[in-house]
């Protein structure tokens, strides 16, 4: 894991002190709310429906046990004892007082955490594959590059007042778990014919009001050119991105308006100018230091297929099911990646209490080299578990209710905070997720349905990524009542697609029944081994449309 | 409106002409809008006194490239502090070799001063009457920058 050096620590201490001063100036009336707003946003502090919300950055989704415990302490001391893990791999606290914010920042800084650039029109926290460094299908740990980008983009003098927020995602793996094609910039590591590693650069993806799949503007960018090239993308966007209309100001609109080819030309021209001026060369010492931080840990040798695990799988189908659903292949023999489901049936997706956070921190310390990941699907991951420890990990996860074997299944729902918390919402999302989870709580049925992703957003801003859910639900308001628009066929991995709207929105009272009928239709018409997404692609919306709008 | 240079409030030695205002006799340092510069470039370059341009917020900097050695002042505008286009204009001007005064005008606030200085601004037109104190507070807020010293060799 990356650990701060003296420089990082000194930088954060300055920022923490500066924020304390800014809050004091605001409380004293020296700063107007208008002037203060961008400053607090640069530190992740939003004003929401009921209170301030603090979004804390979890760089590329990696947390230590020590950090997780501190998050629990902060949630307990200054909030209501729980936090919400988001689709951006961050954590949000929903009940913050402005007066407390400087102390919270100081408490976070002690464990190398902060809320810097988790909001505002700047380059946001860089996200990465949650299996980074341990995935079996990986070229290189993408967090090396995510960390370089974190440093480069932190308090960037030129790119702190962009037309709009800017999100970068990076993956080093063949299979895209980081949804890179729905980010402002998506980076996918690949090799050139000579075997050198570099990046495919995708720009202009995004969801929200105008969902667009990102376009590749560079098939292969050598690693050493990464910062110079991204600086070129940012400069072109900062100069040309629209600022007259909030909804047209993301880079996706620029790319859409000028076309991907022209965008590529503009970026190339700027990149050449940067290179002619000496380029943005990476400091090789720094790169080496960062690489060292992410060097694979020294794993103790472990049996690939421990007898005790085999025996328990045979004896206890619940354990076998959990292993099959909630663990993933690890690059190191005898190890597994364990997903902790933050979607226990009947709980808001992504929420964890302080006690649960501490329990996860303990589990990570005991069985995962003290390391935890946050997945954009709003689950937690223990990345370094010995297979022999799986029974113990399973029991510990059960104790805190994080062992529901539903990773990648219908009740592994992604949902934004919605009207329960969010000032922009038009409808609730969490209660719908809870009702769906309740309806499909039968595990045999859940597993018989197979891979299935439902994403729910409480408004058109699409924080729940509904466009890329296999089934997407978008909350809309119809004469003061909550309705849900349904989209089908969305996907955020290798063949990213935006879901197609199926028809008129359905009422809150009907939406769970409608989804159930849709699922039944799928089960009835699927071909052998076909997932919902595959069936959806084969038959289109037609049969599902009929079932959704069939009279109950 | 204090004008800050080198951390001190100084008198503005320039006359900023509207597009319709007649040129004063040579000897007076003037700035004109980017449009007027394009129209009257030859006349302005013929003057012995320093000349400057107030470049429009969305305007590209490339058309000025040939004139940069002759310009004594380029003013870039922040219509709102949150409109960051002038940061990139400043960066591009410095990269193109501009060495004259680069002045930030408009909604120039304490908390952005350091960012502006880091992309190449060296003069700041501020509305706040205590601009010097604000400058001190702004430059004192940090000594650690990731760019360019850190990630860039
Ligand atoms: S999608 Fe809308 S309701 Fe949901 S969190 Fe985003 S802004 Fe709020």
Image: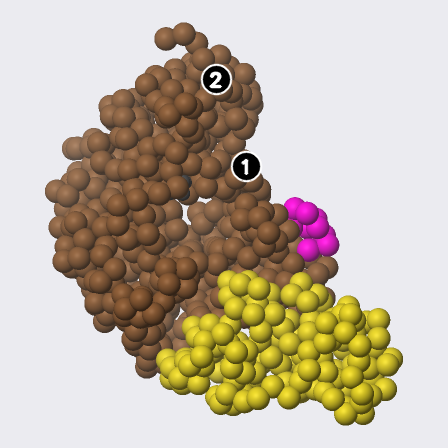
Chain colours: A brown, B yellow
Q: Position of residue B142 (x, y in %)?
A: 38, 81
- Residue A425 shows up from this direction: yes
User: How many marks on residues?
Assistant: 2
Alpha-carbon neighbours of circle 1 within 10 Å: few (<14), some, or many (≥20)?
many
Query: Considering only order in the chain, which callout, 1 or 2, is on the residue closer to the N terminus?
Result: 1
- Residue A544's label in the rendered image is 2
Cβ of mark 1 under 8 A from ligand 1: no
Residue at figure coordinates x 45%, y 76% from the top left: B128
- Residue B91 shows up from this direction: no
Residue at figure coordinates x 25%, y 60% from the top left: A98
- Residue B129's label in the rendered image is none
Residue at the limit of the structure toward the top, as seen here: A551
Which quarter of the rendering shows the N terminus of chain A?
bottom left
| Circle 2: element type | helix
Indicate the quadrant where residue A472 lies: top left
Alpha-carbon neighbours of circle 2 within 10 Å: few (<14), some, or many (≥20)?
many
- Residue A497's label in the rendered image is 1
Q: Chain of mark 1?
A: A
Q: Position of residue B81 (x, y in %)?
A: 51, 66
- Residue span colored magenta: A255-263
Indicate the quadrant where residue A320 lies: top left
Give the image quadrant in which the ligand numbered 1 is located: top left
Q: Position of residue A433 (x, y in %)?
A: 31, 31
Depth check: give the residue in front, A24 or A542: A24
Q: Position of residue B86 (x, y in %)?
A: 60, 69
């Amino acid at each position: 894991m990356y650990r701060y050096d003296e420089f990082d620590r000194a930088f954060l201490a300055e920022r923490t002190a500066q924020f304390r001063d800014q809050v004091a100036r605001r409380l004293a009336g020296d700063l107007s709310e208008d002037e203060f707003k961008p400053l607090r946003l640069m530190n992740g502090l939003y004003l929401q429906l009921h209170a301030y919300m603090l979004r804390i950055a979890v760089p590329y989704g990696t947390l230590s046990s020590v950090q997780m415990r501190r998050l629990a302490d902060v949630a307990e001391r200054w909030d209501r004892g729980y936090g919400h893990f988001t689709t951006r791999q961050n954590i949000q606290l929903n009940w913050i007082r402005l007066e407390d914010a400087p102390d919270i920042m100081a408490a976070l800084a002690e464990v190398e955490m902060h809320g810097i650039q988790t909001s505002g029109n700047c380059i946001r926290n860089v996200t990465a594959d949650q299996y980074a460094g341990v995935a079996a299908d990986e070229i290189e740990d993408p967090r090396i590059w995510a960390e370089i980008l974190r440093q480069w983009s932190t308090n960037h003098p030129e790119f702190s007042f962009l037309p709009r927020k800017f999100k970068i995602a990076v993956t080093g793996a063949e299979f895209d778990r980081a949804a890179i094609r729905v980010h402002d910039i998506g980076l996918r590591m690949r090799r050139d014919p000579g075997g050198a590693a570099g990046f495919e650069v995708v720009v202009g993806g995004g969801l929200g009001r105008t969902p667009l799949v990102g376009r590749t503007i560079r098939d292969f960018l050598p690693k050493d050119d990464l910062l110079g090239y991204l600086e070129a993308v940012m400069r072109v966007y900062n100069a040309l991105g629209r600022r007259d209309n909030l909804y047209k100001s993301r880079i996706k609109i620029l790319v859409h308006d000028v076309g991907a080819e022209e965008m590529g030309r503009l970026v190339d021209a700027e990149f050449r100018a940067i290179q002619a001026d000496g380029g943005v060369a990476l400091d090789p010492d720094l790169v080496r230091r960062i690489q060292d931080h992410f060097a694979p840990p020294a794993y103790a040798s472990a049996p690939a297929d421990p007898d005790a695990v085999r025996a328990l799988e045979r004896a206890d189908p619940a354990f076998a099911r959990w292993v099959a659903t909630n663990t993933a292949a690890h690059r190191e023999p005898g190890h597994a990646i364990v997903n902790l489901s933050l979607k226990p049936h009947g709980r808001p997706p992504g929420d964890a209490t302080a006690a649960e956070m501490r329990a996860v921190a303990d589990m990570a310390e005991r069985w995962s080299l003290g390391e935890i990941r946050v997945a954009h699907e709003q689950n937690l991951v223990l990345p370094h578990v010995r297979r022999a420890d799986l029974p113990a990990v399973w029991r510990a996860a059960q104790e805190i209710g994080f062992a529901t074997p539903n990773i990648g299944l219908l009740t592994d729902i992604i949902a934004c905070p919605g009207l329960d918390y969010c000032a922009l919402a038009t409808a609730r999302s969490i209660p719908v997720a809870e009702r769906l989870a309740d309806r499909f709580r039968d595990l045999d049925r859940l597993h018989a349905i197979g891979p299935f992703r439902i994403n729910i957003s409480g408004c058109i801003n699409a924080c729940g990524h509904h466009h890329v859910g296999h089934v997407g639900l978008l909350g809309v308001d119809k004469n003061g009542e909550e309705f849900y628009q349904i989209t089908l066929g969305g996907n955020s991995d290798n063949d990213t697609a935006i879901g197609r709207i199926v028809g008129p929105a359905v009422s809150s009272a009907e939406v769970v029944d409608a989804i159930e009928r849709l699922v039944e239709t799928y089960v009835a018409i699927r071909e052998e081994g076909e997932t919902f997404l595959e069936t959806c692609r084969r038959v289109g919306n037609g049969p599902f449309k009929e079932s959704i709008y069939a009279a109950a | 409106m204090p004008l800050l240079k080198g951390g001190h409030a100084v008198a503005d030695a320039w006359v900023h002409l509207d597009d319709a205002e007649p040129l004063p006799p040579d000897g007076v340092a003037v700035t004109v809008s980017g449009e007027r510069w394009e129209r009257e470039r030859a006349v302005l370059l013929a003057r012995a006194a320093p000349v400057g341009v107030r470049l429009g917020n969305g305007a590209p900097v490339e058309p000025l490239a040939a004139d940069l050695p002759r310009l004594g002042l380029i003013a870039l505008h922040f219509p709102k502090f949150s409109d960051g286009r002038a940061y990139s204009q400043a960066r591009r001007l410095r990269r193109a070799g501009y060495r004259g005064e680069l002045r930030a005008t408009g909604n120039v606030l304490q908390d952005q001063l350091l960012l502006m200085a880091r992309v190449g601004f060296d003069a700041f037109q501020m509305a706040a009457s205590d601009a010097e104190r604000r400058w001190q507070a702004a430059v004192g807020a940090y000594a650690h920058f990731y760019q360019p010293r850190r990630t860039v060799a």
